[in-house]
């Protein structure tokens, strides 16, 4: 065999090796992206696929690992299983001929969010695939509190137990949005979940009868709402529309008392003046000489003359001064 023939055989052998190297008889196919709910089960779906050339493939090794963790979450190796608490095969009756190697997380936590790798080795070849898990938590139904304060009052809306960070919106009974007038705060709790709170100050002249608080998740979806019916403002805090002056209940009580008191004082002064006038008349009559055996006593009775009125007026003004 000459050198040319040997070269042709070498090239043909390299081509065959290259073709065999590029041929995957076994492939692990996984859903690239999964979403799990906090506190619930999460499924990482992966299935082993084989070519038509492979018949009755048997699984020898399955390994599930989370990126960044040194210890695998689950390992099956030639009949033996090693599982961390909270992780297992999704198929309860899984065996070496079951090509569904999906991983089930029994109680999803925030720490379970991340990238995972699934390695499978069969008697016909091996393959590795990756999958990503996002963990979310639904916010609880919001609660609304009312603080009367010193003006129109303040509404407070609170919701917790959610992840990622959401937001709170405010709407009036007319469906008008008042979120821009509110102040929201988001705090992480010890569990890593968020607590949302929002304050909506109210003005006496622009209050509606009720307001609705809505909680949205990070994607903008509505997760809960609550409506609060406002109590009526007390009269002294209601705007009359006649300027800044406001008439309170105390003023409404004091005004008639003053009027009644003034009338009583006036009547008392009138009685005092009448008594004084009668006393003066009695003294005058006692000093008039007898004429024809009769006293000339003016009969004035209780008639109030002009002078009496003047005297009452002077006494009244003097008492008010």
Image: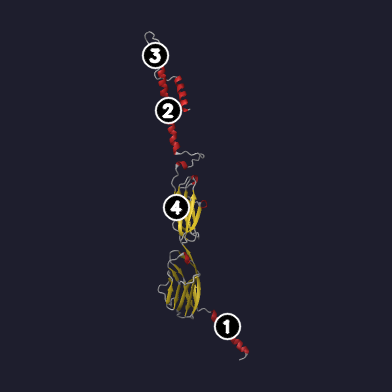
- Label 3 or label 4, whichever comes before in sequence order: 4
- Label 2 or label 4, whichever comes before in sequence order: 4
- Label 2 or label 1, whichever comes before in sequence order: 1
Looking at the image, is mark 2 or mark 1 nearer the viewer?
2
Mark 1 vs mark 3, CA separation in Å: 159 Å
Name the residue carrying label 3. Answer: 286
The kind of secondary structure element at disc 3 is: helix
- Label 1 or label 3, whichever comes before in sequence order: 1
Residue 85: % across, % down: 42, 69
Looking at the image, is mark 3 or mark 4 nearer the viewer?
3
Residue closest to the eye, 216 or 312: 312
Mark 2 vs mark 3, CA separation in Å: 32 Å
Name the residue carrying label 4. Answer: 144
Taking 117 as reference, is 291 above or below it? above
The kind of secondary structure element at disc 1 is: helix
Q: Quadrant of residue 226?
A: bottom left
Label 3 crowd (10 A; few <14 / some 14-19 / many >=20)? few
Residue 7: % across, % down: 61, 87
Q: Write the residue at 62% across / 89% down.
A: 3
């Amino acid at each position: 065999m000459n050198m040319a023939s040997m070269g042709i055989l070498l090239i043909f052998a390299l081509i065959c090796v290259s073709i065999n190297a590029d041929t995957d008889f076994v492939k692990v196919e996984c859903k690239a992206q999964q979403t799990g709910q906090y506190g619930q089960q999460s499924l990482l779906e992966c299935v082993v696929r084989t070519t038509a050339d492979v018949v009755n493939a048997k699984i020898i090794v399955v390994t599930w690992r989370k990126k960044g963790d040194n210890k695998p979450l689950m390992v099956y190796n030639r009949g033996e299983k090693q599982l961390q608490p909270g992780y297992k095969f999704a198929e309860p009756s899984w065996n070496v001929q079951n090509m569904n190697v999906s991983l089930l997380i029994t109680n999803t936590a925030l720490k379970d969010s991340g990238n995972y790798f699934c390695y499978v080795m069969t008697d016909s070849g091996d393959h590795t695939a990756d999958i990503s898990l996002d963990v979310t938590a639904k916010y609880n139904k919001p609660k609304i509190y009312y603080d009367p304060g010193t003006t129109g009052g303040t509404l407070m809306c609170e919701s917790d137990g959610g992840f990622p960070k959401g937001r709170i919106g405010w709407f009036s009974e007319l469906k008008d949005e008042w979120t821009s007038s509110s102040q929201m705060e988001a705090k992480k709790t010890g569990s890593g979940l968020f607590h949302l709170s929002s304050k909506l100050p109210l003005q006496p002249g622009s209050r509606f009868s009720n307001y609705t608080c809505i909680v949205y998740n990070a994607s903008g979806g509505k997760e809960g709402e609550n409506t609060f019916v406002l109590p009526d403002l007390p009269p002294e805090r209601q705007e009359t529309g006649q300027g800044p002056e406001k008439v309170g209940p105390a003023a409404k009580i004091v005004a008639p008392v003053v009027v009644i008191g003034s009338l009583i004082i006036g009547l008392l002064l009138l009685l005092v003046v009448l008594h004084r006038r009668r006393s003066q008349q009695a003294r005058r009559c006692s000093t008039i000489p007898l004429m024809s055996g009769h006293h000339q006593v003016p009969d004035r009775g209780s008639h109030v003359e002009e002078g009496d009125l003047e005297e009452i007026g002077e006494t009244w003004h003097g008492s008010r001064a």
